[in-house]
């Protein structure tokens, strides 16, 4: 089992290397460019929040996971159980990796701005909007958690599309949309994950973590008998 | 590893790709899995490799179901005509990943095969031509040293010289490390010399499973004067018949035919080749079940 999981993790890493390199190259270039703009035009206020970009990357990566990796892994002789478990481990790793890189980048930029006396460059974090203390470990924890939630939910959605085709996938999105549109369910959902007050947003860490962990069960249920061809093509 | 297919049926919607198929594949032989397009060859291979589940029936490899069974899958390698690996990785990554999945992986073999097919480890799989992609698939299949190695038309895009190189390499590998090879191909003339046993599918059913030599022995292609040929073929299973200018040619199949006996009647006689036999047996009018 461990050899198979090692093989799958190596596969995912080799596969993700390209997207990660492209993503961080573009994000870093954009941050540096904005920093230079702030440095060059002292009157102009520049605000940057790279967290959103990271969250979008994680959501898309999770959403593409099954379609992009499942058939190849099964063709190589992996079992469905090992696959789901490996993706879970990989999601944890990617979430922590993204949050760590983000932390290093943001701290470096903040330090540069401080040393260079660039007062018109503001770097916003998700943490700034929460009630949590503004420390590096809280930032790491919040980013890791949000990335992990998005990767897990994206992976679940990806598996729904893979197994049940467009009808199943779009149907699930429609149900989610209804849940967000209807005030009662929307409020219940928001209350489950966050507690908004005048000071800021109080993230409910345990329910978020629970959602990410529980998402693996329906994903496993969907993939345990899945074939190497997506549902839509069969 | 012995493979048993027991009453397998596989349906895709209303279409039955395999119909109550039963057969046994013994270990350490080279099998030719033949049939026309849509005969069910790919479906059968995918079932064997645990890619899909049958609608009913069972596939057993050494008595175990291969689906989701790592004990079986580590000894099973199916190389298809395309989509064997993600087209974003470098060849060295593909080989490294494969080596982790197949416990009997031979890096020495892989290196040798890459050299034979002029592939560089640093190449990106995205930029490979169809022939190079096939060569990489073949490299993985042979270097995996999986006890059951299945090639489903892996020669697409390979030129004739590379294909013949592959046939020689396969035989070399087979001699050095005996294992079960299942080859599905439409280039039967080229590959038939490798087959020890032939499995012929038609419309999802097993039409024939015979030793390649027995298959040839049980066939005869005779030509000569129409009346002599007609007399000779009377009561025999004719799977192909052509007439021209008072001469007739027939292909017979089903019993051991004596070439000398036919020649003594003034007929030209020779054994049928596997490709011709496959073509004519697969026709709905010509083929009877010869299991």
Image (cartoon, coloured by chain):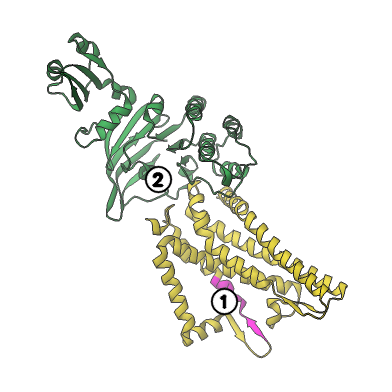
User: As displayed, is residue A138 above or below residue B243?
Assistant: below
Of residues B104 and B131, the one drawn nearer to the viewer in this rendering:
B131
Q: Which labelled disc corresponds to residue B46? A: 2
**What secondary structure is marked by label 2?**
helix
Which residue is disc 1 drawn over?
A: A207
Whether label 2 touches label 1, CB < 8 Å: no
The answer to whether one can see residue B165 in this image is yes
Q: Which labelled disc corresponds to residue A127? A: none
Mark 1: few/some/many CA within 10 Å (<14, 14-19, 20+): few
Q: Which corner quadrant of the image does residue B273 belong to?
A: top left
Residue range highlighted in magenta = A200-211
In the rendered structure, the answer to whether residue B146 lies left or right of residue B23 reads right
Chain that bears disc 1: A
- Residue A226: x and y, percent? 42, 56
In the rendered structure, the answer to whether residue A131 lies left or right of residue B253 reads right
Chain that bears disc 2: B
- Residue A159: x and y, percent? 47, 62
Q: Residue at x 52, y 69 (%)?
A: A214
Image colour for chain B is green
**What secondary structure is marked by label 1?**
helix
Of residues B58 and B255, the one drawn nearer to the viewer in this rendering:
B255
Residue A207 shown in magenta: yes
């Amino acid at each position: 089992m461990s050899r198979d999981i090692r093989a799958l993790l190596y596969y995912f890493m080799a596969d993700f290397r390209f997207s990660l390199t492209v993503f961080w190259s573009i994000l870093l270039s954009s941050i540096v460019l904005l920093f230079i703009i702030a440095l060059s035009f002292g009157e102009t206020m520049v605000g940057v929040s790279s967290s959103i970009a990271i969250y979008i990357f994680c959501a898309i990566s999770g959403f593409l996971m099954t379609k992009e990796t499942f058939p190849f892994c099964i063709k190589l002789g992996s079992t469905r159980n090992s696959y789901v478990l490996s993706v879970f481990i990989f999601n944890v790793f990617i979430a922590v990796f993204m949050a760590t890189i983000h932390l290093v980048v943001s701290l470096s930029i903040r330090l540069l701005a401080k040393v260079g006396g660039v007062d018109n460059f503001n770097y916003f974090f998700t943490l700034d909007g929460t009630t949590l203390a503004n420390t590096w470990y809280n930032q790491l924890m919040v980013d890791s958690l949000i990335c992990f939630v998005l990767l897990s939910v994206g992976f679940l959605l990806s598996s729904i599309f893979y197994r049940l085709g467009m009808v199943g996938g779009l149907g699930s999105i429609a149900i989610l949309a209804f849940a967000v549109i209807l005030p009662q369910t929307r409020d219940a959902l928001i209350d489950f994950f966050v507690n908004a007050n005048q000071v800021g947003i109080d993230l409910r860490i345990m329910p978020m973590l629970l959602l990410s962990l529980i998402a693996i069960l329906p994903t496993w249920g969907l993939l345990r008998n899945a074939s190497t061809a997506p549902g839509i093509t069969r | 590893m012995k493979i048993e297919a027991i009453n397998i049926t596989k349906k895709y919607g209303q279409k039955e790709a395999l119909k109550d198929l039963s057969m046994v594949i013994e270990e350490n032989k080279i099998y030719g899995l033949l049939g026309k397009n849509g005969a069910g060859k790919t479906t059968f291979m995918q079932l064997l490799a645990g890619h899909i589940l049958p609608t009913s029936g069972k596939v057993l490899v050494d008595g175990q179901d291969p689906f989701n069974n790592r004990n079986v899958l580590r000894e099973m390698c199916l190389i298809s005509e395309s989509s064997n690996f993600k087209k974003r990785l470098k060849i060295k990554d593909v080989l490294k990943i494969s080596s982790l999945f197949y416990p009997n992986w031979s890096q020495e073999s892989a290196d040798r095969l890459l050299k034979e097919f002029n592939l560089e480890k640093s190449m990106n799989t995205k930029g490979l031509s169809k022939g190079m992609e096939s060569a990489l698939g073949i490299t993985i299949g042979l270097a995996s040293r999986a006890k059951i190695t299945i090639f489903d038309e892996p020669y697409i895009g390979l030129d004739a010289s590379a294909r013949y190189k592959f046939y020689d390499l396969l035989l070399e590998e087979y001699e050095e490390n005996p294992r079960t090879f299942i080859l599905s191909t439409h280039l039967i003339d080229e590959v038939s010399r490798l087959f020890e046993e032939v499995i012929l599918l038609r419309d999802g059913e097993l039409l024939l499973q015979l030793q390649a030599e027995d298959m040839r022995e049980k066939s005869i292609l005779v030509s000569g004067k129409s009346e002599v040929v007609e007399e000779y073929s009377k009561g025999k299973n004719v799977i192909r018949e052509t007439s021209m200018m008072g001469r007739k040619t027939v292909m017979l199949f089903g019993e051991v035919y004596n070439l000398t006996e036919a020649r003594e009647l003034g007929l030209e006689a020779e054994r049928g080749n596997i490709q011709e036999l496959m073509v004519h047996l697969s026709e709905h009018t010509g083929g009877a079940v010869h299991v």
